[in-house]
Amino acid sequence: MTRNGEPIRTVDVLHCGDEIVIAENESGGAEPNPLLSVAVLFEDEHLAVFNKPPLMPCHESIKHRGDTLSNFFAAHCPGTVFRCVNRLDRDTSGCVIVAKSRFCANALQKHCEKVYYGICEGTDICGGRICAPIARERDSIIKRCVREDGQFAATTFCVVQRQGKYSLCRFILETGRTHQIRCHMAHIGHALVGDDMYGEKSELIKRQALHCGEVSFTHPVTHERITVKAPLPDDMKRIMGG
């Protein structure tokens, strides 16, 4: 950190007109993998929005090295820290915002609106608002359930299309609980197709049929209102006859 080109400490007194420069310690983190392919939906010098493919994790883990969105980003933006603003589960596809600076990551964290699309079991469903508290299952560190002692959770949804035994729904989350859409839809008897944690496996799709189809945010630098959309992936289109 410098003041008017000279090194400065955090305890030093500032004066009107001083020019303060703070240099972030940037490090790419994950190993770059230029062989990965991820669609870039929007990008400028401050942030990017990617269309994460289904079955691709956002971050590396013990079971996933070199095959994640962070590995793609390391090749796409060498030397830039991977700051994932809206992390999606491995099986969930769609829009992921990645900030290229700590400032942008912090600014976007609480000012990002998301729209999800999911294919649910059954057609006797009209949409509405699900308001049911979500808690962690007592015998699991991953699975969630609706329980009275859980955290407040609310999901608004509507039916976009019906096809055979299934309904394509549009979801807006009022809260951001883990597995919220999956848990809430299973709670009302309409689990997502292919969701073997809250429903059943399906021969039609290798994952839960859930997709982040739209993100909207105010750009932290330009202050422009930006909306980015990701088309429904092929595996979900096929179920709905597309």
Image: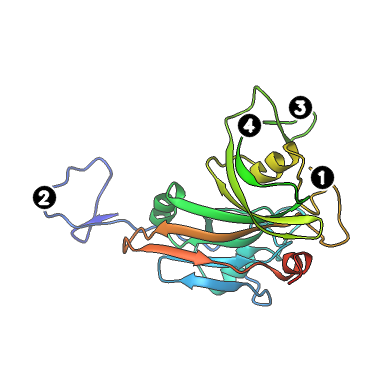
Residue placed under numbered mark 3 in the picture: 138
- Which residue is the site of mark 4? 132
Q: Badge 2: how crowded within 10 Å, few (<14), some, or many (20+)?
A: few
Where in the figure is residue 240, as x and y percent of width and height? 75, 65
Label 1 to label 2, Cα distance in Å? 61 Å
Could you say whether the residue bearing mark 1 is in a helix, strand or loop? Answer: loop
Instruction: Choose top left, top right, bottom left or bottom right for residue 170.
Output: bottom right
Horizontally, is 130 left or right of 91 in the view? Answer: left
Alpha carbons under labels 4 and 3: distance apart: 17 Å
Marks 1 and 4 sit apart, C-alpha to C-alpha, by: 18 Å
Q: In the rendered image, which quarter contains the C terminus? A: bottom right
Mark 1 and mark 3 lie on one chain; the one further toward the N terminus is 3
Whether pointer 2 and pointer 3 mark residues with C-beta atoms closer than 8 Å, the reply is: no
Query: Toward the viewer: 163 or 21?
Result: 163
Residue 85, relative to residue 56: is it above or below?
above
Q: Which mark is residue 199?
A: 1
Seen at 74% across and 35% down, the residue is: 141
Give amino acid for label 3.
Answer: Arg
Cα distance between the residues tagged 4 and 2: 52 Å
- First of labels 1, 2 by sequence position: 2
Closer to the observer: label 4 or label 2?
4
> Is the C-beta separation of discs 4 and 2 under 8 Å?
no
Residue 11 vertical placement versus 206 (above, below): above
Residue at which label 2 appears: 16
Q: Earlier in the sequence, mark 4 or mark 3?
A: 4
**Which residue is at a point 19% across and 57% down the rendered structure image?**
19
- Of label 4 and label 2, which has the lower sequence position? 2
Which three-letter amino acid code belongs to the residue tagged 4? Ala
